[in-house]
Amino acid sequence: MPSNPFDVVLPEREIAAIADAAVADLAQRLAQRAFRPMGDPQAGPGEVPEHDALAILHALVHLQHAIERQKDRAATTAAREGAGYPQLGAACNMSRQGARRRWPGLVSAGHPEDEGARPRPADGSH
């Protein structure tokens, strides 16, 4: 796999710890804002208990889908800027072939004409 065209300044373990903390905080805030306790029609958003695991789990599902959409947008932008499948794969810790399966036609199709265009994931989700 080719190396990334950027310098990694923190150890992977530290990057993972920072990302985990950020996602946990975001999931908690989303759950508190978007959900209310079951069976309490008077409760409003923001009243989800701090440790409501199911609400947080559901928030994490929404965040996972949002991350996948953001990855698709970033891949499209990178391809427009000249990145090929080897570079896309390296940035995503996958092989060139994995990137080609994830974003078929993104690189070989050239630059999408429509600014709003985004790749279709190979698995049909999103």
Image (tube, rainbow, N blue to C red):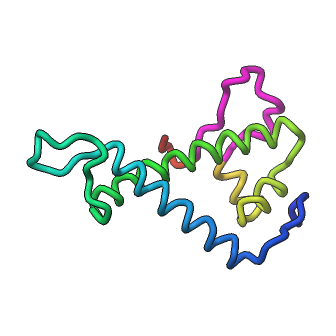
In depth, the one of 101 and 35 nearer the eye is: 35
Residue 71: percent from the left, percent from the top? 65, 47
Depth check: give the residue in front, 79 or 31. 31
Residue 49 x, y percent position in the rendering: 26, 59
**Magenta segment includes 116:** yes
**96 left or right of 118?**
right
The mark total stands at 0
Q: Is residue 81 left or right of residue 14?
A: right
Residue 55 horizontal/vertical position (percent): 29, 56
Q: Is residue 95 left or right of residue 41?
A: right
Across and down, in percent, residue 22 comes to: 56, 61
Residue drawn at 49 percent across, 54 percent down: 26
Q: Between residues 38 and 103, which one lies in front from this camera angle?
A: 38
Q: Indicate yes or no whether the magenta region holds residue 104.
A: yes
Q: Residue at x 84, y 68 (%)?
A: 8
In which quarter of the view is residue 77 placed? top right
Left or right of 101? Residue 63 is left
Region in magenta: 103-121
> Magenta segment, principal secondary structure?
loop
Q: Tell me if residue 105 comes above or below residue 63 in the rendering.
A: above
For residue 15, what is the image quadrant? bottom right
Residue 3, compared with residue 78, is above or below; it is below
Q: Residue at x 77, y 21 (%)?
A: 113
Which residue is at the far left?
A: 39
Q: Quadrant of the N terminus?
A: bottom right
Q: Against 28, is 120 above or below?
A: above
The answer to which of 65 and 120 lies nearer the viewer is 65
Residue at image location 57% in from the left, 48% down from the top = 68
